[in-house]
Image (cartoon, rainbow, N blue to C red):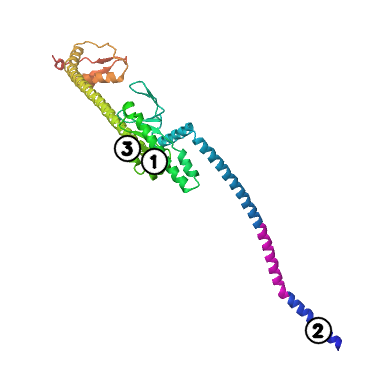
Amino acid sequence: MLALQHQSASGDLDKRREEIKNLVKPIEEGIKAVGDAAREMEATRATAFGSIDEQLRSSVASAVEVARQAGALKDALKRPNVRGRWGEVQLKICVELAGMEEHCDVEFQETSLTSDDEALRPDMIVRMPGGRKITVDSKTPIVHFLSYIEASSDDERQAALVNHGRSVKKHVADLAKTDYMQRVADSPDFVVMFLPNESFLSMTLEKEPTFMEEALKRKVLVATPGTLIGLLKVVQFGWNEQKIAQNAQRIAHEGSKLNGEIVKFLADFAKLSLALDSVNEAFGSSKRRVENQIAKRSLNLTALGARNTSSLGKSKKVLGEVANLLKAAGADDEDIEQTEDPEHLSIAATSDEDEIED
């Protein structure tokens, strides 16, 4: 009895154990899947963080290199010859954007002579229609501009702004003293001072709001890249208008010459028409004379017994035309006969004296 109960209990226990195992199995599989995903995520995160770390290191290295190059550029721009070269490069860029290339209407570093044979060398001269020349001088006031950028306090920045404004105003005064308007031949009553960076002008106006008016009073037009391109565009428009006017004059000249040739051709054609009319009239008169006089005389001579032994050539057209002339003179088809020689045409003699016309 106890053995049966023990056997029954063991069977129930195995059954329950199997049921519990079946219940726990999905949970176990889920936990395993979560663990696999967590391990995969950790591996991905480690790879990503490694890549980010690599990119950060590269960015830092690039930033250091950019800072080094910027420092080198800053140091280079402090040298006057480098600043001048930069200003010339900016001028050339403005010229290209305006469509006023060097070989057309702009002359770089052109040396001009004053009335006293003193050499003047502005950075650029723009030739205008009509022979006028606009003088452009590039100025690069960058020392105090860099001081403003490097300033670590507001007081230093304000001092740099003041010094920058004074520096730019001094450039205007120095340019006005050169008196390009009087010393460069065919120059208008102003000279252009080119600032290769818009910030140079904006920083000046921050402390010197009347700077532009004062410069204009000195006959100095301050131009940044944007305003210089606009000025060059206006000059280019003037050149285009002049070219259009010149082309119109050339077209009018060529049209006048063509019209003269047409008139000459019409005169020659009229002469040719009159000559052809005269030839046609002479031909008609000659043909009537042949038909009414010469051919009839030939018929009369044939009727009197004269024979034709002249060669008329081998052309059937010529023989046919002669026959037509004889017919027009009164000969019948039977009166006109071909001799044994195909080159000869004879007219049969007739005994009827009534057919002979005096």
Q: Which residues are magenta?
A: 22-43
User: Mark 3 or 1, which is nearer the eye?
Assistant: 3
Residue 32 on image: x %, y %: 70, 66
Q: Tell whether position 38 is magenta.
A: yes
Q: Is residue 99 visible?
A: no
- Amino acid type of the residue tagged 2 in the rendering: Ala
Which secondary structure is most common in the magenta stretch? helix
Q: Is residue 45 visible?
A: yes
On residue 9, which mark appears? Answer: 2
Please tell me which residue lies in front, 75 or 3: 75
Residue 133 in which image quadrant: top left
First in sequence, mark 2 or 1: give its number: 2
The residue located at (81%, 81%) in the rendering is 10
The residue wearing badge 1 is 226
Gap between marks 2 and 1, in whole Å?
A: 100 Å
Please tell me which residue lies in front, 277 or 24: 24
- Amino acid type of the residue tagged 3 in the rendering: Leu
Please tell me which residue lies in front, 295 or 330: 295
Q: Secondary structure at mark 2?
A: helix
* 3 w.r.t. 274: above or below: below
The residue wearing badge 3 is 216
Gap between marks 3 and 1, in whole Å?
A: 18 Å
The residue located at (29%, 20%) in the rendering is 317
Q: In the picture, which quadrant includes the N terminus?
A: bottom right
Answer left or right for 336 relative to 227. Answer: left
* 3 w.r.t. 134: above or below: below
* 73 w.r.t. 30: above or below: above
Q: Tell whether position 13 is magenta.
A: no
Q: In the picture, which quadrant includes the C terminus?
A: top left
The residue located at (44%, 33%) in the rendering is 88
First in sequence, mark 3 or 1: give its number: 3
Please tell me which residue lies in front, 182 or 340: 182
